[in-house]
Image: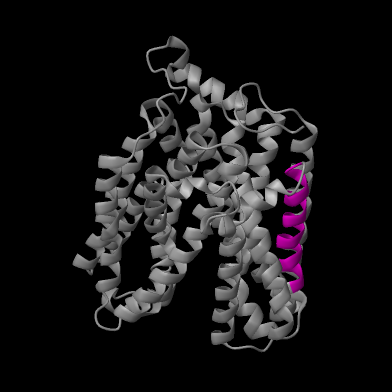
Amino acid sequence: MTWVGRLFGRNASMVHDDEFRLLLAANAIGALGTALVSPLLNSLTGPFGVSGAEIGLLVTAVGAPSIFLIPISGVIADRIGRKPVLITGLILFGSAGAAIALTTDFTVVLALRALQGVGFAGITPIIITSFGDLYADDTEATAQGIRFGVTGLSQAVFPAIAGIVVVAAWQYPFFIYALALPIAALVWLFFDEPADDGRDPDNEAAAETGYGRGLARLAAHPHAAAYLVARAIVAMPFFAFLTYNSLVIGRIQGGSASQAGLLVAAFSIVYAVTSTQAGRITAWFDHDAIPLVGANVLLGGGLATFALTSAVPLAVPSVVAMGVGVGITFSLYRSIITGVAPPRFRGGLVSLSESGARAIATLTPVTIGGLLAVLEPSLGRANALRWILVGAGVVAVFVGVASVLLAHATSAPEGATAYSAD
């Protein structure tokens, strides 16, 4: 067995494909929309002349457009092809991000971040869809897992570099975004879409109205709808942990900011490694429902037990459990959803899935913050946070497991290419 097989399993031959490598490169830079600026926010208040509360808009500005534009990019990709949308997304994302280094006008900066959000809508969802075009079954699950592992690695390496170079000048980290431009050129020159992907723009059945009705019927199918809900709900414990882990460690566990950083790093490493094994894990079971139920319990239950622990060392097993749950769910759900959709609707269904998850990711911190404001006067700051996160974990487990079981109990939509519930 080759080293690739030893690392990722027998279904990992795609790592030798040029298309796979190009998509991974595009994915690595597309994963930096929020992660790259996250460690820089405090350093940027001075150059941009804004408060600590206002600087958080850098995160909101890049995330909000994608909620609405990801479905549109999926429809366009189904109509004209994946490659033009991916190239356009990379160019917008890279050029707008690098241009931030050329201004200190915060209004202009927010506009450029929003333009990056437009570009992002044409990157990650299209990459996920393209993997569904190129691969199937356990091979695709492995490809999606490796992609998500690369996401974790990119979000660990590049923000660390940004944190170092920002000391020299605040502008330098934003030039990292310019790496998207040569990647776009390579995609244009060397990426080949599958010749038969089900698109037929000359067929009247593929007209805009017919496409919209067909995609709506597919998304409303009980099997597909259950997986769309399951994919979206995992974003809640994921972003609840990323947003509030430092508060739990500081207010409940008596830890420090450095300890919080180490736990987040451990979480990232665990989910990155686990995701690369998604195809191998799937192959161990007769049904995808088995590992998915277990992963949902690990993710939501891990968040709940993390909030209940009273010391940082005791929180480590919970963080590891969450990392395993994220690595499995994020990879397998994406693989399954691309297989549920016929090729003609694949980009649209994947984009609906990703947009739903982005909406949950955006709403989770806002909802938890609102509940904290309501419950703190009666429960106290620490207890309010603890029980809100426990509740979020329980809800995630219940909704996630119920959705998986519903999907398993129903048949796949007609025309599904790679997945069935049997």
In the rendered view, does 299 fall on the left or right side of 68? right
Question: Where is residue 4 shown, x and y percent of the image?
Answer: 52, 56
Q: Identify the residue at horizontal 79%, vertical 52% (top origin).
A: 398
Outermost residue, front side: 1
Outermost residue, top side: 204
Specify the quadrant that holds the N terminus: bottom right
In the rendered view, does 317 fall on the left or right side of 181? right
Q: Identify the residue at horizontal 22%, vertical 60% (top origin).
A: 99
Is residue 384 highlighted in magenta?
no
Q: Identify the residue at horizontal 54%, vertical 49% (top origin).
A: 12
Is residue 294 highlighted in magenta?
yes
In the rendered view, does 158 fall on the left or right side of 6? left
Specify the quadrant that holds the C terminus: top right
Question: Where is residue 253 shown, x and y percent of the image?
Answer: 70, 85
Quarter of the image for residue 301 reads bottom right
Residue 334 visible in this rendered orientation of the protein: no
Question: Where is residue 416 shown, x and y percent of the image?
Answer: 62, 27
In the rendered view, does 140 fall on the left or right side of 413? left
Q: Identify the residue at horizontal 60%, vertical 78% (top origin).
A: 263
Q: Main secondary structure of the magenta part?
A: helix
Q: Out of 365 and 206, give the one closest to the viewer.
A: 206
User: What residue range appears in magenta?
Assistant: 287-305
As drawn, 312 above or below 420:
below
Residue 191 visible in this rendered orientation of the protein: yes
Quarter of the image for residue 108 reads bottom left
Outermost residue, left side: 102
Quarter of the image for residue 372 reads bottom right
Q: How is the image coloured?
A: one colour
Figure label count: 0
